[in-house]
Amino acid sequence: MKVFLGTLIAMFLVSILTIELLMYAYRRLKNPSPKKLRKRVRGISMGDHTAEATDILRKKTFSSIPALNEILSRTPGVNALDRLVQQANVQYPPSVFALLALVLALAGDYICFLMTRNPATSLLVGALLAGAPLYYLVIKKRNRMHKFLRQLPEGLDLIARGLKAGHAFTTGLKLATENFDDPLGTEFDETLDEINFGVSVPDALKNLAHRVDCPDLKFFVVSVVIQRETGGNLAEIIENIARIVRERFKFDDKLRVLSAEARFSAKVLVAVPFLILIGLRFMNPEYVSLLFEDPMGKKMLGGSAIMMIFGIFVMLRMVKIRV
């Protein structure tokens, strides 16, 4: 059995290596050689209008490998993954996280099955490991959006001061990009690039609101779009939005202080059963071992786990106050 599994693993690795080599050869054959590229550039620079037109529109790619990009482009949910990757501002394409999730799922399922010989447990472990890259992206996105929200009032004030000084709206965006780092500076700089390349200001701001998952930013975008259609004092509108965002920060901090005791109590209630189980495991192993060895004990553990998950969910909903 072990020899057969080893053979399967070796065949899998060889197949992956062969596919990678074939894809590398395909890319080398498809991409133009440096000589052809120089010839094409020379023809364009000398006014050769017979050269084929160049498409300057930005195309969405999920992977640098054409075949994998074609597969991912037809896979449901990849657009949501691509947006999550953009919001997390990681340097890798969505294909890396999709393949990493697949590899972790297969490896976790295989290793867990060798250790437990239980298909249900191995599938559960594989599913949990497959979700690890997605969880990493969610954490990165949440931290980045929180930092963006903290930078937003100062950035809006800077734009408003630029407008009061007589500068254009795009000049105010440029001031914000020069004085703030990622994420606000990066996102505003991308919006400014879109405007410079010919995208209208309302469309560029709507793209900004789509990229950044921040409700307060949507207030800013809607206000600017409406002001450009109806008129009004844009500097004053932006200053009012910045003031409202700051007031929300103060209110959120007050709620966090008032709910601190409830959140700490919830953490204690979640940790107490595990601490008791660990303590009994060291003090009286025979007493606790029945839960893991007896069939009725295993059923009790499964039921307890389900009830604890439900209880944790209820406590999280109780202590998390949304305004």
Image: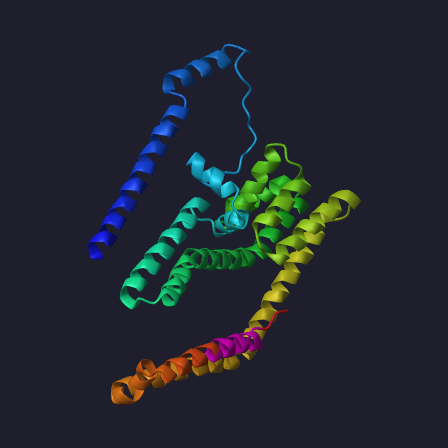
Query: Quick check: 178 left or right of 246?
Result: left
Q: In the image, what residue occupies the spot 39% across and 62% down?
A: 123
Q: Position of residue 145 (x, y in %)?
A: 53, 56
The relative height of residue 47 versus residue 254 in the rendered view (above or below) is above
Q: In the image, what residue occupies the spot 46% across and 15% down?
A: 40
Q: In the image, what residue occupies the spot 54% across and 74% down?
A: 256
Query: Quick check: 96 left or right of 11?
Result: right
Q: Quadrant of the C terminus?
A: bottom right
Q: Can residue 185 be seen in this snapshot?
A: no
Residue nearer the viewer, 164 or 59: 59
State the scheme by which the image is colored: rainbow
Which corner quadrant of the image does residue 115 belong to?
bottom left
Task: Give the main secondary structure of the magenta stretch.
Answer: helix
The image shows a total of numbered marks equal to: 0
Residue nearer the viewer, 4 or 308: 4
Residue nearer the viewer, 157 or 294: 294
The relative height of residue 322 versus residue 214 in the rendered view (above or below) is below
Q: Position of residue 280 (x, y in %)?
A: 30, 87
Q: Is residue 198 magenta?
A: no
Q: Can residue 319 be seen in this snapshot?
A: yes
Q: In which quarter of the image is the N terminus?
A: bottom left
Q: In the image, what residue occupies the spot 36% across and 26% down?
A: 28
Q: Position of residue 155 (x, y in %)?
A: 58, 52
Residue nearer the viewer, 213 or 240: 213
Q: Is residue 319 magenta?
A: yes
Residue most extreme to the right: 230
Q: Give the range drawn in magenta.
A: 307-320
Q: Position of residue 105 (x, y in %)?
A: 38, 56
Residue most extreme to the left: 3
